[in-house]
Amino acid sequence: MEENNYRKYLSTICSIAALLAGWELLALAVNNPALPGPIPALNTFLQEVPRGLWQHFLISSYRVFISIALSLVLALPIGMLLGREQSLDRFIAPIIYLVYPIPKIVFLPVLATLLSYGDVSKITLITLVVFFQILVPIRDASRNINAALINSVKSLGAVRLDIYKHVVWPAVLPEMLTSLRVASGTAIAILFFSETISSQEGLGYYLLDAWSRFAYNEMFAGIIAMGLLGLVIYFILDYIEHLICPWKFV
């Protein structure tokens, strides 16, 4: 186990080193102030953190984590139900097929008008996007459970609640975690867009402000901060996966 952890950490370090090397080579090839190298960008990042970048990071983190949590709380039970209850799915599925392809970002002006440009409209928009990205995989995973497995549990006297607790829930866990990983990237992308419109806080605002001032080092400091936010979410999900799906690491 310790050897596996060592290899994992070594692979992570090598991957980061390769990314930084590629970034440096690209910056040298382009030779343009709009693309600073990793060392100037990292230096600016370290300088900007105590100057207020940390506040923008915390605000954006709050918006993303609340949105993902709300999406999961809503999508998980609905997806499990739709996958197993055919009559309910026949009614709800057409609504999903109609709404899911629509780029939810178009609703930002409506949400901003109804809820103002504060946290509520941004969190609502991100939740609206992430909700469907979690709902659809969970619904499909719940639907594709082997019928023989369900029947065998029923033969032991299990009621509907027992089936959801002991069969459906474990079956959808891997899909839930995968969808959360995919949705986290989408959430950060939507966060960036929402924070560039009538906002004075958050990483999206910080990036747009730096770009408008042609402060490219600061802009890349904000990009690094966004990357760190995604990395934090990834590590949290990885830790949760070890807790609730230990059989995957035996």
Image (cartoon, grey):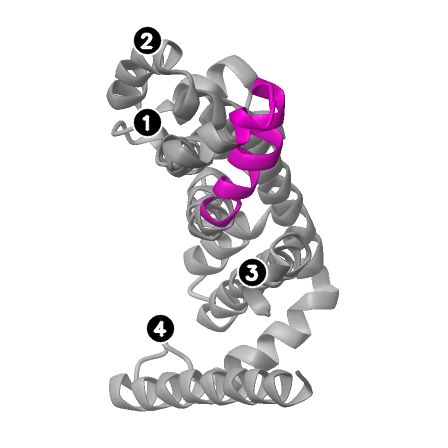
Front position among marks 4 and 1? 1
Task: Give whichever of discs 3 and 4 has the lower sequence position.
Answer: 4
Task: Give whichever of discs 4 and 2 has the lower sequence position.
Answer: 4
Q: Quadrant of the C terminus?
A: bottom right
- The magenta-colored residue range is 153-175
Q: Amino acid at mark 4?
A: Ala
Q: Does the CB distance between marks 1 and 2 fall below 8 Å?
A: no
Instruction: Pinpoint residue 125: horizontal percent, then vertical percent.
Output: 47, 29
The residue labelled by disc 4 is 34
- Residue 57 placement: quadrant: bottom right
- Could you classify mark 3 by the number of other residues whose Cα lies within 10 Å: few (under 14), some (14-19), or many (20 or more)? some
Give the label on residue 91, or none: 2
In front of the other: 128 or 165: 165
Left/right of residue 205 with respect to residue 97 in the rendered view: right
Which residue is drawn at the image coordinates 45% and 28% (left, top)? 151
Cα gap from disc 4 to disc 2, whole angstroms: 51 Å
In front of the other: 140 or 146: 146
Q: Amino acid at mark 1?
A: Val
The residue labelled by disc 3 is 234
